[in-house]
Amino acid sequence: MKRDAESRTQPAVPAERAGAPLTRTSVDDRIVIRPFESDDAAAVRALFITVNRLMAPPHLAVRFETYIARALREEIDTIASYYAARGGQFFVATAAGELVGMVGFELAEPGVAELRRMYVDPQFRRRGLGRELLAHAETEVRKADCTRLILSTSELQAAALALYRTAGYREIRQDVATQDTNKTLGGAVRRFHFERTLHRDGGPDAAGS
């Protein structure tokens, strides 16, 4: 994917003013990023399972299966209601009608959003799609009147760590979760937490605050 695919044309002003959902199309027209629809549920589920199983080290395979089952039950299988209840949104990326990526966000506190579930189909990696999904999420977070975006990723996701660091995110801490949740694998994997300030006026964003 060409580098300029990461700088997409903004939607028409009247649509934004009307509160219409934002749909992004890459410059090459192969990738479309749009709001999640109920018909996407099976593909989102399949991508979540695939990515997490590929990520799991052999010695944590059983633990990952437990984590996957919990995340499916508590979040992935109820995408629409889960994110609506948390003031967030969820988006999918498609190519020729097939789901190739996804990303969401939920409100962590007033003015602060948490990036969630940014995954790219393994066959579509190294094409800039992760950066496109991140940029799309940042735009939607600004529209939700949030000025700070926080996120976490694990030591198992080297590409994600590199992306966030080069995209201007500031590492604020590292930890190892003590409990299993729909977001974390307790006591097994180190997580890296990042933040970025997002300016609403279109000016340069800042890492941290």
Image: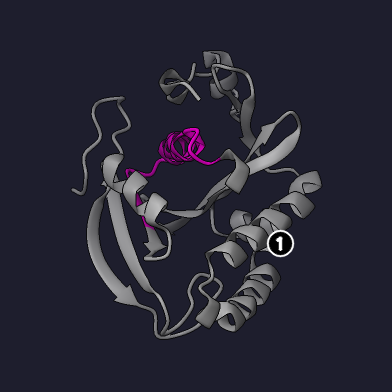
Q: Helix or strand or loop: what does disc 1 sit on?
A: helix
Residue 185 on the magenta segment: no
**Total numbered circles:** 1
Q: Name the residue under label 1.
A: 78
Residue 35, above or below 187: above
Q: How crowded is mark 1: few (under 14 residues within 10 Å), some or many (20 or more)?
A: some
Residue 178, above or below 165: below
Using the image as rendered, state which of residue 51 and residue 147 is in the foreground.
51
Residue type indicated by callout 1: Thr
Q: Position of residue 153 (x, y in %)?
A: 40, 61
Magenta residues span: 125-151
Which residue does the image show at 61% across and 83% down from the upper left?
62
Residue 149 on the magenta segment: yes
Tell me, yes or no, if residue 121 can be seen here. no
Q: Residue furthest left?
A: 209
Which residue does the image show at 21% across and 49% down from the upper left?
208
Which residue does the image show at 64% across and 65% down from the upper left?
75
Using the image as rendered, state which of residue 17 and residue 126 is in the foreground.
126
Residue 188 in which image quadrant: bottom left
Residue 102, above or below 5: below
Q: Position of residue 106 (x, y in %)?
A: 50, 55
Q: Where is residue 209 in the image (x, y as percent from the top left)?
A: 18, 48
Q: Residue furthest right?
A: 39
Q: Position of residue 50 (x, y in %)?
A: 65, 59
Which residue does the image show at 61% across and 42% down from the upper left?
123
